[in-house]
Image (cartoon, grey):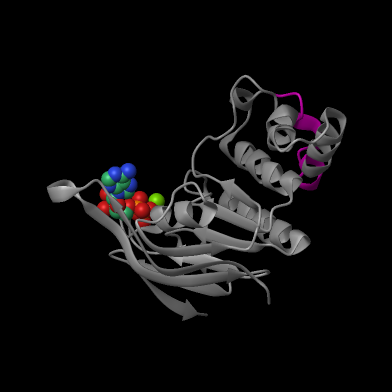
Amino acid sequence: MTAIISCTDVSRTYGSGRDAVVAIHGVTCEVREGDKIAVVGSSGSGKTTLLHLLSGLDGPTTGEIHRYDAPVGIVFQGPSLLPPLDVTENVALPLLIAGCDGGEAEDRAREALRQVGLAGLGKRLPEELSGGQAQRVAVARVLAAAPRLIIADEPTGQLDSAHADEIISLLLGVADDLEAGLVIATHDPAIAERLPYRWEMCDGTLGRQTC
Ligand code: ADP
Ligand code: MG
């Protein structure tokens, strides 16, 4: 399988001097097309830091990250929709930013919303959605942009287990459709079990387990 991103001996330190916090260190890993990876580990173990580096939101302090020119889609734990924009506009926005024509962006947004089962909610504002619906919209936003790598940081952290299961099913389906790599941070063992690979973060280092 083709590699999408690889990290070699990567570290990320926040702050400096006596206040420095080494969030992750010595991390070497690779995500390939079609990989589905659960990043598990206790709070503070470095999951979010690693996901930010994989998604390109942040850069490493030391080490190397090589991206194979792969667009990335991100699903966050909490609310991430822009409040003044309706659902369709939220899904279309990354496409518009990427230079897509307005009509095409809207068509792709509508199609993605249909695929996540929200065809009827395009005109709603984020504040009119339940937490589960808002996360579906966030998944639709990723789907519409068709990335090669999908990063989700505790995407079900604020949902009950039934809705959590639905969101994970959607993410797995979207990753299959796009033949994308999928990396989900979670501390829910039931969710981690649904993904074939497990990366275990412990005090900023990465161990690996394949289930
Ligand atoms: P997790 O997502 O597993 O809870 P994080 O990656 O958020 O772990 O955090 C790893 C470590 O880095 C923790 O000790 C945390 O307090 C610290 N940390 C995270 N972000 C920052 C920041 N912006 N500034 C300082 N320390 C941070
Ligand atoms: Mg975190």
Left or right of residue 158, residue 98 in this image: right
- The structure residue drawn at horizontal position 82% and vertical position 32%, both measured from the top left corner, is 106
- Residue situated in front as seen by the camera: 174 or 5: 5
Q: Is residue 25 above or below residue 93?
A: below
Q: How many callouts does the rendering have?
A: 0
Highlighted magenta segment, given as a residue range? 113-124
Left or right of residue 165, residue 101 in this image: right
- Residue situated in front as seen by the camera: 191 or 79: 79
Q: Position of residue 188 (x, y in %)?
A: 45, 60
Left or right of residue 150, residue 143 in this image: right
Q: In the rendered image, is residue 186 in sight?
A: yes
**Magenta-colored stretch includes residue 121:** yes
Q: Quadrant of residue 104?
A: top right
- The structure residue drawn at horizontal position 54% and vertical position 74%, both measured from the top left corner, is 197
- The structure residue drawn at horizontal position 39% and vertical position 56%, both measured from the top left corner, is 60
Q: Position of residue 57 (x, y in %)?
A: 49, 46
